[in-house]
Amino acid sequence: MNCHTCGNDLVKVITDLPFKTDIHAIIIIKNLPVMQCGNCSEYLIEDQIMQKVDDIISRMDRGAEMEILNFAA
Ligand SMILES: [Zn+2]
């Protein structure tokens, strides 16, 4: 898979990423596997990973302003 911005190879990295789930709510998912470009700062989340992220977000406590979860858990 290649970077859609610069065409460089994407490498799989494990990182922590914040996702906005509401106007005032943020979820930080730790140990998330993403495909990151070695050349620019562009990254891509694979479809099956994104589905899991959606799943995690849908199970988030609606009253919380910020939550930190481990992807692997
Ligand atoms: Zn790139």
Image (cartoon, rainbow, N blue to C red):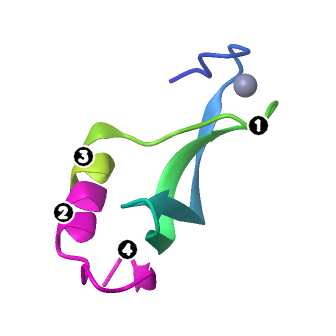
Q: Which residue is mark 2?
A: 55
Residue sitting at 24 percent across and 56 percent down? 54
Q: Is residue 72 left or right of residue 56?
A: right
Element at badge 3? Answer: helix
Determine whether the beta carbon of the residue marked 1 sits less than 8 angstroms from the nearest atom of ligand 1. Answer: yes
Q: Amino acid at mark 4?
A: Phe
Q: Is residue 24 left or right of residue 16?
A: left
Q: Nearer the viewer, mark 3 or mark 1?
A: 3
Q: Amino acid at mark 3?
A: Gln
Q: Earlier in the sequence, mark 2 or mark 3?
A: 3
User: Looking at the image, in which quadrant does ligand 1 appear?
Assistant: top right
Q: Which residue is mark 3?
A: 48
Neighbourhood count class around disc 2 (C-alpha, 10 Å): few under 14, some 14–19, many 20 upward: few
* Percent coordinates x, y for residue 7 in the rendering: 68, 13
* Percent coordinates x, y for residue 22 in the rendering: 37, 61
Span of residues in magenta? 52-73
Q: Which residue is mark 4?
A: 71
Q: Earlier in the sequence, mark 4 or mark 3?
A: 3
Q: Is residue 24 left or right of residue 8?
A: left
Residue sitting at 30 percent across and 59 percent down? 53
